[in-house]
Image (cartoon, rainbow, N blue to C red):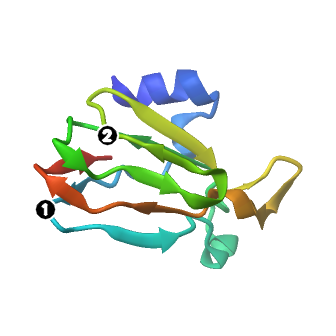
Amino acid sequence: GVLQRMEAITGIPMTNYESLQLVRYEVGQFYRRHHDYSDTMDETVGGHRILTFFMYLNHVEEGGGTKFEDLNYIAQPKRGSALIWPSVLDDEVDTLDEWTYHEALAVEKGIKFGA
């Protein structure tokens, strides 16, 4: 299944995963620039989110990309594709990776589904 494929790609056992979060964006909807690192994760069993694995579940007719402004990169939603990015530094897992602030750009036409 999907979780087993994620595990094979990342090398991280699924017992360390958070629950999947499904998202749906309609025309005009977006998610402002943010980071997936959270100081509140210090006290959880899993600790900080070290990676984000975001899957695009459909094609979006227009817009809806994931923008990494500091990297000058926009990933366009395409069914079956995924993005993986770090939230922390490789050698300092308690330190936010400044390069991976990102945002979900507004859907201009269609609907965007992701997980």
Residue 20 is situated, as x and y percent measured from the top left of the image, at 36, 49
Q: Is residue 99 above or below residue 39?
A: above
Instruction: Describe residue 13's horizontal placement relative to residue 26 as left or right.
Output: right
Does residue 32 appear left or right of residue 12 in this picture? left
Mark toward the start of the polypeptide (1 vs 2): 1
| Residue that appears at 13% across and 51% down | 111
Q: Position of residue 7 (x, y in %)?
A: 53, 28
Q: What residue lies at 57% left-to-right and 67% top-to-bottom?
A: 35
Label 1 crowding class (10 Å Cα cut-off): few <14, some 14-19, many 20+? some
Q: Toward the viewer: 47 or 35?
A: 35
The three-letter code of the residue at mark 2 reads: Pro
Quarter location, residue 49: bottom right
Residue lying farthest to the right in this orientation: 91
Q: Quadrant of the N terminus?
A: top left
Nearer to me, 49 or 102: 102
| Residue linked to disc 2 | 77
Q: Does 78 sit above or below residue 25?
A: above
Q: Which mark is residue 81?
A: none
Horizontally, is 57 left or right of 43 in the view?
Answer: left
Q: Which residue is mark 1?
A: 27
Q: Secondary structure at mark 1?
A: loop
Residue 8 position in % (x across, y down): 55, 21
Disc 1, disc 2: CB below 8 Å? no
Residue 107, percent from left and from top: 22, 57
